[in-house]
Image: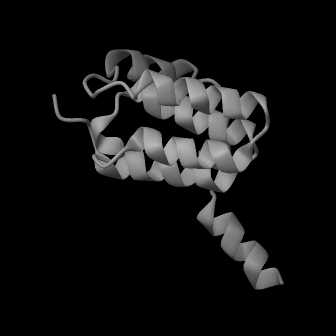
C-alpha cells in the first residue's frame, strides 16, 4: 500500500496539482510569452462538454473531451480550448485525466501556425 501511495505522489507532483493563479515572475513570464496559434475546438463539442459538466456526467464529458481533441491531437488546439477541457475535467474530479491532457499538451509543443 505504501508503494502505491508513493507512486501516486511521484506521478502527480504538487506543482502540477497547484491551482493557484500565477503571480510575480510566473505572471510576468506568461504575459511575455502568451500562447499563440492553434485552432479552436469545435464550438458544438465544447458546448456539449460544458453541458455534460453541468449535469455531472463524467463519462460523457470524458468522451466529449477526447472528441474535442480530435485526430490531430492536442498540438492542433489553441491554449483556450485546451485550458477549458482541462478545467472541465478537474471540475468533474477527473484530476488524473486532466493531468494527462495537460502533460500531453505540454509534450506536443506549440501548435503549428
The number of numbered discs placed on residues in the rendered structure image is 0
Name the residue nearer the viewer: 22 or 11.
Answer: 11
- Residue 66 position within the rendered picture, expressed as x and y whole percent measured from the top left: 48, 48
Quarter of image, res 8: bottom right
Residue at 56%, 23% in the rendered image:
47
Residue at image coords 31%, 49%: 71
Residue 80's x, y, as percent? Answer: 45, 23
Single out the residue that lies furthest toward the left.
Answer: 113
Q: Is residue 78 above or below residue 68?
A: above
Q: What percent of the width, then of the height, locates residue 14?
A: 67, 51
Work out which quarter of the rendered image holds the N terminus and state it. Answer: bottom right
Q: Is residue 86 left or right of residue 66?
A: right
Residue at 52 percent of width and 27 percent of height? 46
In the rendered image of this protein, does residue 68 appear above or below residue 97?
Answer: above
Residue drawn at (64%, 27%), measured in percent from left and top? 50
**In the rendered image, which quarter contains the C terminus?**
top left
Dividing the picture into quarters, in which one does residue 77 lie? top left
- Spot occupied by residue 111 in the image (x, y as percentages of width and height): 24, 35
* Residue 94 visible in the snapshot: no
96 with respect to 39 (left or right): right
Is 61 on the left or on the right of 58, as rendered? left
Residue 50 appearing in the image: yes
Q: Is residue 94 above or below residue 23?
A: below
Horizontally, is 78 left or right of 92 in the view? Answer: left
Amino acid at each position: 500500500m505504501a508503494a502505491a501511495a508513493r507512486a501516486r505522489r511521484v506521478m502527480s507532483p504538487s506543482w502540477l496539482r497547484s491551482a493557484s493563479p500565477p503571480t510575480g515572475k510566473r505572471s510576468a513570464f506568461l504575459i511575455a510569452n502568451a500562447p499563440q496559434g492553434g485552432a479552436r475546438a469545435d464550438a458544438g463539442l465544447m458546448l456539449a462538454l460544458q453541458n455534460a459538466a453541468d449535469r455531472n456526467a463524467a463519462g460523457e464529458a470524458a468522451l466529449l473531451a477526447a472528441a474535442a481533441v480530435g485526430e490531430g491531437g492536442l498540438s492542433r488546439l489553441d491554449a483556450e480550448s485546451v485550458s477549458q477541457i482541462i478545467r472541465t475535467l478537474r471540475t468533474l474530479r477527473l484530476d488524473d485525466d486532466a493531468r494527462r491532457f495537460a502533460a500531453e499538451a505540454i509534450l506536443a509543443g506549440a501548435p503549428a501556425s
